[in-house]
Amino acid sequence: MVRNMEKVIEEAKNAAKNMRRNILKMTHEAQGGHPGGCLSATDIIAVLYKGFLKVDSQDPKWSGRDYFFLSKGHAVPTLYAVLSEMGFLTEKELLDFRKLEGRLPAYPSCELTPGIDMASGSLGQGLSIANGTMLAARLNGTEQRAYVMLGDGELHEGQVWEAMMTAYHYKLNNVCAIVDYNKLQLDGSIDEVKTLGDLRAKWVSFGWNTLEIDGHDYEQIYKAFEEAINYKEGPTVIIANTVKGKGVSFMENEVGWHCAAPSDEQLKIALEELS
Amino acid sequence: MKIAPREAYGKALVELGKENKDVVVLDADVAKASMTVLFKEAFPERFFDLGIAEADIIGTGAGFAVAGKIPFVNAYANFLLGNGWEQIRISVCYANQNVKIIGHNIGASAGKDGPTHLPLEDIALTRVFPGMTVIEPVDAIEMKKAVMALAAHKGPAYMRVGRAPVPVITKEEDLFQIGKANIMRIGNAVSVFACGVMVSKALDAAIELKKLGIEIEVINMHTIKPLDEECILKSVKKTGVVVTAEEHTQIGGLGGAIAEFLAAHNPVPIKFVASPDRFGVCGTYEELHEILGLTKEKIIEKVIAALAMKKAVNK
């Protein structure tokens, strides 16, 4: 894939702006969801889809596709929003989020939603899935890649560390993990609940190519994905320092917005800020 | 003749591997015990050791399935289902992935390894999942057919594989179809629904019971889910009384599944031959079966008790 950084960044910025607006509308309409962790992940996911992930909205199960697994499944509005930007979903149906009808449940479903390859919502499972797909790709001799986004609180789950060892052991250079390191979780700050300590050192000691970036700086995001592709010795993790609630002034760094829905008034203010 | 189910399983996997290039085998550091080592030797590029990490091995298997492979995921049943249960729930069953989960050392078959290593709860743990198929082949011959059938079947499945040798009681020409129970002996007095090694014990019991003038019907319920409801109803309409037999706790296993079905559709007296609500102990396979009441004698006792219950109910 021939890429032009400036072009990708421009497209991703436009997509992210629309995605943020849609995330607010979805969570407002549903009066539920997790806007804080959606907004922290938005810029990274926009760059990934606009610049790196090989997928085809006309053929979602195309056998040569790349995979993106949203292991932090509660951020699924971000995924729905980007799938709308990419043509897998219509913008109109985004408002079906969490509704009985439609195909956009509260957490990802690979049975209901085109463009989603694995269910999640039960934390800790995505990296193992990514590893399995890439072991299969290696067997098939295909040039596919798997990306998986993990929450920072999600790293409390032991399975993640099992899977980190697996990716390193099998030298899965086609696996790229992204940690949405927004420093907050449901019960409070990560450091209050259970600290991750020196997170970078942990990944390094597990043998991963470990990159650390500002998860809202488009050039850094772009270059990290590119570096992950070029690193051939094993898996790469991008520790993305992010701001929970990024882009909406009253949501930023507020733990209360981990799981809460905006009121009519809050939606209005947020959409004005994002216009 | 007795053959260990795991040996038949290991050989069947190799046969399957020759026929189907999409089959991959994953093991959690028990390949020499599960006998997947045979597949590893035959097809090293399609064998993956995930180490002692049962949550991860389920997820990795699900990933293979996402990419179109047919993964057989192996570990001791208790560790695999205990540590991987939520992963089976979401990444396999809710996601409807074509993953074959193979639980080893089932029931009391690891004998002297003792209570930590004797999974008596695995049927209960797996049959609660929507969309899950649950199978226990009756012997080495049926094992091969079951492995082939599992690969051909699309969707999540769990299969029990024992460590200790068990009698071979079926023939090559016998049919095996997932979801279709096999009648091993025809009778009209009591329907005995059994799975695994308990089928052979039921057949032994039938010989003794015949001497008492009691002709039991013995049915091999190799598929515990989905239940062959048609077969169950047909037999029960004839006999009006049931005994179930399984190498599993009395809670939530084959007996539970049949009782749930019959209570709603055709209530009849039922007696259960199963492990009591307790853990195992260290002992030989035979000693454990004595202690847990998984014997021919216990089946005979329950058949007679079931008949007495039927008589009392009908008074």
Image: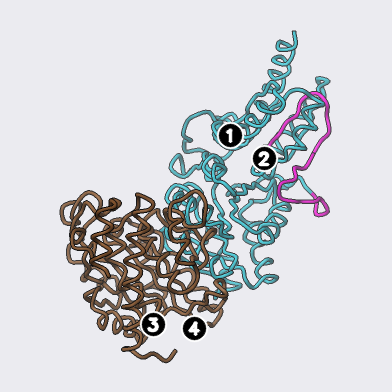
Chain colours: A brown, B cyan
Q: Which residues are magenta?
A: B171-195
Q: CA distance from mark 4 to mark 1?
A: 53 Å
- Marks 2/4: CA distance? 46 Å
Q: Amino acid at mark 4?
A: Glu
- CB under 8 Å between callouts 4 and 3? no
Residue B289 shows which numbered tag? Answer: 1
Residue B190, placed above or below residue B218? above
Q: Are marks 2 and 4 in contact (CB under 8 Å)?
A: no
List x then y, in percent, for residue A111. 54, 59
Please state the horizontal and vertical placement of residue A104, each as a whole percent of the image: 47, 57
Name the subunit of mark 4. Answer: A
Q: Quick check: is B131 in the magenta stretch?
A: no
Q: Is residue A98 above or below residue B201?
A: below
What residue does disc 4 label?
A143
Q: Position of residue B179 (x, y in %)?
A: 71, 46
**Looking at numbered disc 3 in the image, what kind of residue is underneath it?**
Gly
Q: CA distance from mark 3 to mark 2?
A: 55 Å
